[in-house]
Amino acid sequence: MKKFAELFTVLDQTTKTNEKIEALVNYFAISDAADALWTTALLTGRKPKRTVKTSELKLWAMELSGVSEWLFEESYHVVGDLAETITLLLPPSESQTDYSLTGMMALLKTLDKEPEASKKNIIQEIWMQLNTAERFVFNKLITGSFRVGVSQQLIIKALAKHYNLVESNVTHRLMGNWLPATTTLQHLLFNPDIQEDLSKPYPFYLAYQLDVPFASLNNIQDWQIEYKYDGIRGQIIVRKNELFIWSRGEELMTDKFPEFEVLKNTLPDGTVIDGEILPFNGDEPMPFHIMQTRIGRKNLSKKSLSDAPLCMMCYDLLEYNGVDIRPLPLSERRAHLETLIETLKSNNLAAAAVLKLSPVFECHTEQQLIDLRLVSRDRMCEGLMLKHKDSLYEAGRRRGKWWKWKIDPLTVDGVLIYAQKGHGRRADLYTDYTFAVWHHNELVPFTKAYSGLTDKELVEVDSWIKKHTKEKFGPVRSVTPELVFEIAFEGINPSPRHKSGVALRFPRILRWRKDKKIEDANHKEDLLNLIQQLSNPA
Amino acid sequence: MLLKFDPYGIYCPQANVYIDPWKPVKNAIITHAHADHAKWGNENYLSHHLSIPILKFRLGDINVQGVEYGEEIIINGVKISLHPAGHIPGSAQVRLEYKGEIWCASGDYKLQLDGISTPFEPVRCHHFVTESTFGLPIYRFPDSQTVHQDMNDWWLKNKEEEKTSVIIGYALGKAQRIIKHLDPAIGTIYTHGAVDNLNRILEKTGLELPPTKRIISDTNKSLFKGNIVVAPPSAIGSPWMKRFLPYSVAICSGWMQLRGTRRRKSADRGFVLSDHADWAGLNQAIKETGAENVYVTHGYKSAFAKWLRENLHINAVEVDTLYEGESLNESTTPENEIDS
Ligand SMILES: [Zn+2]
Ligand SMILES: [Zn+2]
């Protein structure tokens, strides 16, 4: 646990990738295979379930530290993180015990079956045997909120380096639903039969935003041009009459999408399709919020199924008749994909109905490309994808052969009306803002936004807020309406839960409009009009 | 009430003096030379004599009277004296006594020994004005010996990796405290001009520091490798830093106790080193004054006042002031680098 906590501390402290990789490699070098496996699992988001209630943890920590509930809450508000709050409030430890990571994880697992009283004893006892860094990691693990600032790519690089393996193979091996309980490090990294796990997906190939001039793409005819759909990127896997659907976030979502059940017995054994899962109204994609509502549902009712029937917009074919065809050029993979879907159509119309082929567009000039990108929003898309016809299907985010060209975000000018101190990262500054638009000569709040200002601007706004506070309600301050900000967002939906009647997707501050007065801010009607425009494209 | 809080600062009507006023007044007692406590434009200043050279450096040719710790002056029947606050060299608590009623305004203070300031001395009083910059139980600062040890270890490690170490702390107080405890056997200590200015001034008042070199525009870049640079917060992210590449940067502040601040500042290291009292320090200091009335200023005012009422059964109230506590933000003061 000490070594793991030290690793965590280094990964958490440095922002430099080479230092992170070095720390990981050093850690793998001094750890046994079991701890290395657990570390790989934890760093790739395979965290254990929470086995204690956070409300209980809070009480146990309050008891040890002699802090009353309101003071605990004040502290928590400043720290912004329960695990860290507890770490900081607990009295210094009495003695030090070095648990192995694997041992600790086993102990946490058995905790689930313990009665409350003994859970409390076990946890309080462990707390008092750990140093500060270990306590923090331990608290993160028991609260199920363990996260590290290290991308999957870095872990892969480090494993590849330490075990002398090819990176893209490691990427593939780490995919899927393995857990430390179901495998060993040896099996995970070196088992010759990688398809033994039928559900194992391939690593997704991701694109960067286009940031090179059009001219450098050379011959535009060499590029496959598609819409960038706004749904859930996923992989449909059919192997030995079993169906698996993975999201890009490596979540197994098969149960969420019963529409695709029909593919189990209709797609050939050994088929893996990459595409975008979307709600469709006949041939028309529906707005993203309809998808969101459906995904949020615990139980899928008949109504939700018929309100938001899902299809996959197929982009690419990765496995065909049991063969990994990722090393083929895109033009050939596309041909196989078209054949696959054509064949399915002639065999089983119902099955073919849930798979749509992502249309490919012909563009000969830059202007055509620009025009196409502009109309993409009307098709509920967020721009274009440019994929070189020679491109192999690579693993992870890469430059050069695939580009996404997203449309510019939507924007609205809002007035700053409330501010709250940031959590964690920005605990000492007012950085969480609520913005308002006009409605009948009144300012109604319509969104919160946290990010987008530079550190310098944050400081400036922070000191402005302190001098222009009207009222304080708990942690929130209301301020004199005076500052106008341009808020960018990716989508807008009607929302009866919000006072303004709308909810924005991915709102963020684009810039501080020092040139604008509050009278220049947008009106609620502007937002409602935007919703109209976007859902009824002309 | 011997002291009251008005729009100009902390005021003693009987003696017609303000303590750390934030708007110009006739008579000002200055607890210490940090920018949020020592403002420009007062007619007459009074401070500890160690603060005077810095006040003059910062505020120009002011009319200032210096006193020793414990030296008593009487204005219109009010006995006034300054007592060590342990915050930075020359920092003082202001004790005022009138007709048997004793008040003490502490300014900024800490109980930890820093090796450069006269150690904090509790002042018995009836009314105590306290800061609360770190007035929450999450702030338990590590022993500063350990922190200085870590700092030297960090420097040594960077030296082995052939990097320059850049360490960030306020130019007044923090920087000298850092320099005082750096191990000159590891390498050369370079200073930013703002730090060096204050070093020179403080050295004239008798502060002894290890040898340092001021960085000037034509200091040869190759000299920095393996050595350490002490710079104020305004240096973070500025083009001035480029000359040290490759470097590792560390920030020294009480806020480094929080992971969020460490990460937001994206420094390579955060050392928890503060010139303010932590939670235990604040509690101890207040108990030792024996005061029944406590006025809580800059920091976690309301929480700390509530704690004092509930747990120490002290008549504690929060008071609004414009002092800024330990700010990590560069542009809160005109000089950028002088702050608590
Ligand atoms: Zn202060
Ligand atoms: Zn200060």
Image (spheres, rainbow, N blue to C red):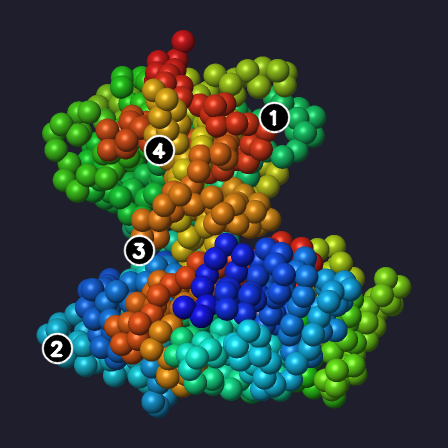
Task: Identify residue for label 4.
Answer: A445
- Residue projecting furthest to the bottom: A95
Of the image marks 3 and 1, the number of the one nearer the N terminus: 3
**Does the beta carbon of the residue at mark 3 sit less than 8 Å from ligand 1?**
no
Tell me which amino acid carries mark 4. Pro
Mark 3–mark 1 Cα distance, whole angstroms, equals 37 Å
Q: Chain of mark 1?
A: A
Pointer 1 local density, CA inside 10 Å: few below 14, some 14–19, many at least 20: some
Q: Are marks 3 and 1 on the same chain?
A: yes
Mark 1–mark 4 Cα distance, whole angstroms, equals 48 Å
Element class at badge 1? helix
- Left or right: A413 in relation to A46: right
Of the image marks 3 and 2, the number of the one nearer the N terminus: 2
Q: Residue at x 32, y 63 (%)?
A: A74
Task: Identify residue for label 3.
Answer: A177
Tell me which amino acid carries mark 2. Ala
Q: Is there a contact, CB below 8 Å, between mark 1 and mark 4? A: no
Q: Chain of mark 2?
A: A
Task: Identify residue for label 2.
Answer: A117
Of the image marks 4 and 3, the number of the one nearer the N terminus: 3
Element class at badge 4? strand
Q: Nearer the viewer, mark 2 or mark 4?
A: 4
Quadrant for the N terminus of chain A in the image: bottom left
